[in-house]
Amino acid sequence: MLIWMASGISLLDDDWGHLLLASKGVGFALTTGWEGLVGQGGYYRPVVVLSFYLDYLIAGYEPAIYHIHNILIHAGCACLVFLLARCSGMERAVAWGSALLFFVLPIHTDSVFWIVGRTDLLCALFYLGALISFSAYLQRGSWSVLFALAACSALAFFSKEMAVSLPAALAVWIAHRKAWKTARARRGMAVVCGALLVYFGVRWLVLGSVLGGTPRVSVVDWTRDGAKAIAKFGMGDIWWLGIALLIASAGIFICKRRDAMNLVLLLGGLLGASLAPALGHLHNWYLYLPSAFFCVGIAAVWLDKSRPILRVLFGVLILYYGTVLGREGMFWREASKMSEHALANLMPYAQKTTGKLFVCNVPAAWTPKGGFSGKPLFAYALKNALAMRSSQPLHAEIEMVNHVWLTGDFHCRVHRTNTGFDLAIEKGGFFSFHGKGQGQTPPFAIDQSRGALTVHALDSLSVALNVQPGDGVVIYNKGKFEKLWP
């Protein structure tokens, strides 16, 4: 069902730029950052870029193959959650429940249905693989398992920066097993730390930095984000459900499972270690990996043999989450239709304009009524989308004047003035400002080379543009682009 749903979703927002970069080949993937930059810091994720390049070799820019690949990786991560639960000493029923809960958790919708969400999918796949390999190595001491541990660790590091917490997660596992004095534990930790040093060295050679900027240290922000993340794990379209699930699970645990405190410390430590890199800049997709440990803990509490009613309630929770996930998939398909319609509508203007094409009200994202989260459209990617979809080279220089965040049927009133245009949203959204205006409270002004914006309120602004002969001005309104000038 998910493969059918996802295969009907087009490229959205960041997908356009990252797939365009990935199509440049293996050498480009290994010698540039995630944004295609060299020596300027940022993100280094060659494993993800190479996976995109593989899809590109198979199907070009046809989005279906990319989405199917995402779903298969997500299913693989759910299988590893099953194995992780078994390695933690869980019964088979609890392990199945953990995997199923992980597979349908609504917080995963961005990572599963958005192609660039593959960064989190691959990071989690190899991170969990490293944990499972480490557990197996502590038991058997096989050199082949040690090699698997080294490979999974390296692949996790080169998939996403969040994986740098892996040594801390292994330390939690060692403490749980009381294995600090064993040669296998020390050897396994040394292999993972060695892989991490290699990652830092390659990253420094390519991007000129060991880490992606200086971490923002704030106990208040970290504590707030930690509490918010744990509540978000179980949230659906009912915002308070995550909090209720945590409170109910804690109550059941205190009454029935106090003998499993070691398990709580293990899962809590793993969750904390994997979540730590995301604190201070929390987004839903950063919760994909940490949610694996959350799912094992919830399943361990609710799938109690002595309490059949809890198992029934757990089944109801799975059905509810599955329904939310399916509905979100349909919303992503609707967002794709909006995106494709907007591109097709704007393309003739882009092909006919010889100078600059000023685009007002670029739809940044869409939040459907009852939706779990916003669906990306063209926050930054309109130029790439037009260039990749045009059947002929575009001579127009695309200038995005302002963005809108859509929340319903969008309708904007336009008034022509001597210096430009006054825009007022009558229905279905609000203005958003990427760049200088981000985070400011109206009224404020934004001076740009292309002109000036005077923001009166989130639904009202004035636009003054430096329009020259050969330029064009269009605006997104009532679900399509309209010509304003000439």
Image (cartoon, grey):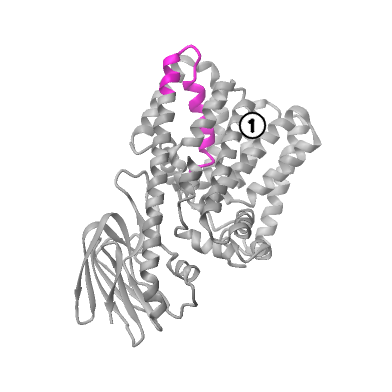
* Left/right of residue 419 with respect to residue 378 in the rendered view: left
- Answer with the quarter of the image where residue 328 lies: top left
Range of the magenta residues? 287-314
> What's the residue at 54%, 58% (across, down)?
213
- Answer with the quarter of the image where residue 458 lies: bottom left
Inspect the magenta stretch and tell me whether residue 303 lies in it: yes
Q: Amino acid at mark 1?
A: Trp
Q: Secondary structure at mark 1?
A: helix
Q: Main secondary structure of the magenta part?
A: helix
Q: Position of residue 428 (x, y in %)?
A: 25, 56
Label 1 belongs to which residue? 173
> What's the residue at 54%, 35% (across, down)?
292
Say few, some or many: other residues with alpha carbon within 10 Å of mark 1 (under 14 / 14 to 19 / 20 or more).
many
Q: Position of residue 316 (x, y in %)?
A: 40, 25
- Report the front residue among 145 and 211: 145
* Left/right of residue 327 with respect to residue 277 in the rendered view: left
Inspect the magenta stretch and tell me whether residue 283 lies in it: no
> What's the residue at 73%, 43% (across, down)?
150
- Report the front residue among 89 and 250: 89
